[in-house]
Image (cartoon, grey):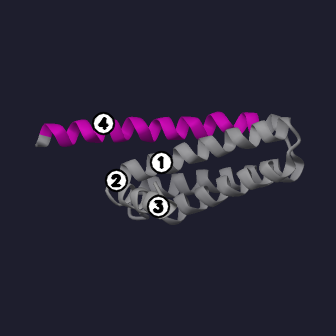
Amino acid sequence: MDARGYQQYKQQSINSMTPGELLLLLYDELVKRSTLASIALDKQDWTTFEAALDRCTDIVDYLDETLDRQYPISHDLSRMYDYFTYEMGRIKMGRNKKELDRLRPMLTDMRDAFRAAEKNNGIAREMQA
């Protein structure tokens, strides 16, 4: 398969996802990149470490920008995203493994909470059909 065909396939896959599936994809990538940052930090691969944390920050910024502010929970999520961004900046500047290890489970917990919500939402949709 040529690269152009693969890119078209990826684009079609993304375009056919529900908003909940896209959210989970972003959280999966966030968890994956934070894990990559941890591995790179252990290896003292500063380029990979910083790139992984920069990507984490980009994802969190995107999640914050796309919040639907009409819901009260959006305010709480925005504050949490601000906290994540702040902590990732501190971790990057200090190359702090302890803080990264403290932050990673929080990111995983958020992903798991949204996964459970998406699953419950899917069950509710099935019941309505």
Q: Is residue 45 left or right of residue 84?
A: right
Q: Disc 4 or 2, which lies upstream in sequence?
A: 2
Local secondary structure at mark 1:
helix
* Whole-number angstrom distance, CA of label 4 to CA of label 3: 31 Å
Local secondary structure at mark 3:
helix
Q: Is residue 48 left or right of residue 12?
A: right
- The tag on residue 17 is 2
Could you tell me residue 102's position as x and y percent?
73, 34
Query: Type of residue at label 3?
Result: Gln
* Whole-number angstrom distance, CA of label 4 to CA of label 2: 17 Å
Residue position for label 1 = 25
* Whole-number angstrom distance, CA of label 2 to CA of label 1: 10 Å
Could you tell me residue 118's position as x and y percent?
35, 41
Q: Disc 2 or 1, which lies upstream in sequence?
A: 2
Magenta residues (range): 100-127
Q: Are marks 2 and 1 in contact (CB under 8 Å)?
A: yes
Q: Are marks 3 and 2 in contact (CB under 8 Å)?
A: no
Query: Type of residue at label 2?
Result: Met
Q: Are marks 4 and 2 in contact (CB under 8 Å)?
A: no
Could you tell me residue 36's position as x and y percent?
71, 41
Q: Is residue 69 magenta?
A: no
Query: Type of residue at label 1?
Result: Leu
